[in-house]
Image (cartoon, rainbow, N blue to C red):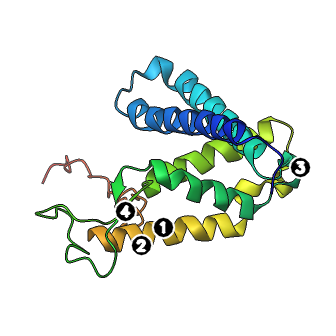
Amino acid sequence: MDSIPHHEMESSATTLQTTATTTLLSVSSSSSTSPSSSTSSRYENQKRRDWNTFGQYLKNHRPPLALSRCSGAHVLEFLRYLDQFGKTKVHTPICPFYGHPNPPAPCPCPLRQAWGSLDALIGRLRAAFEENGGKPEANPFGARAVRLYLREVRDLQSKARGISYEKKKRKRPPPQQQQIPLLPPASGAS
């Protein structure tokens, strides 16, 4: 067993939980207001908070983990850890409300992090990793396993809620028709 006293472990877990909850709560509140002048600073602040939360997670990892040794598997562990703070009901396939976007009654299905929140979080952490000296080719947030996990979460949540996430099609400008110039009426004597 660890030689760390039980109260110290609880204290560090509580600190991490508080940090993670604060970070995740600010994800949902930051998207509700959108004055254009403060968008970049709000994004930068959120990115910094997310980066600090992940750093705290690495410190509290048993054994503590250096960022240089962090892999996609550790990122997945972090994302699964964050699910305990989620607010999105994800119905299981055996739930009678599976596939219904607006269930008529409560059910015991778990609350999870919403796919969109996780996707945005990974985007910010990916950028923060490189801004903090990490090499793009060694970025654990861009690992194939993380991309596959996010895709799996998206698909699972869309089926569970009966709402499909369809890839947005790029709007293409309508084809321009070639205009034939109008000839001026013939002005001649007949």
| Alpha-carbon span between mark 4 and mark 2 | 13 Å
Inspect this view and state whether residue 13 appears: yes
Mark positioned earlier in the residue sequence (1 or 3):
3
Under circle 3, the secondary element is: helix
Q: Are marks 1 and 2 in contact (CB under 8 Å)?
A: yes
Residue marked by disc 3: 68
Vertical order, 137 against 187 (above or below): below
Q: Which-is-in-front pick, marks 4 and 3?
A: 4
Q: Which residue is mark 1?
A: 153
The mark lying in front, picked from 4 and 1, is: 4
**What separation in Å lies between label 1 and label 3 (alpha carbons)?**
27 Å
Q: Are marks 1 and 3 in contact (CB under 8 Å)?
A: no
Q: Amino acid at mark 2?
A: Leu
* 50 vs 93, nearest the viewer: 93
Question: In screen coordinates, is 42 left or right of 170?
Answer: right
Report the front residue among 13 and 190: 13
Element assignment for label 1: helix
Per the model, the C-alpha gap separating discs 2 and 3 is: 32 Å
Please name the residue shown 38% across and 67% down the image.
Answer: 157
Where residue 180 appears, as percent x and y from the top left, is 32, 58
Closer-to-camera residue (13/184): 13
**Number of numbered callouts drawn:** 4
Question: Contact (CB < 8 A) between labels 4 and 2?
Answer: no
For the residues bearing labels 2 and 3, Cβ distance under 8 angstroms = no
- Amino acid type, mark 1: Val
Q: Position of residue 114 (x, y in %)?
A: 42, 54
Q: Are marks 4 and 1 in contact (CB under 8 Å)?
A: no
Q: Quadrant of residue 142?
A: bottom right
- Dot label at residue 156: 2
The amino acid sitting under disc 3 is Ser
Q: Is residue 179 above or below residue 6?
A: below
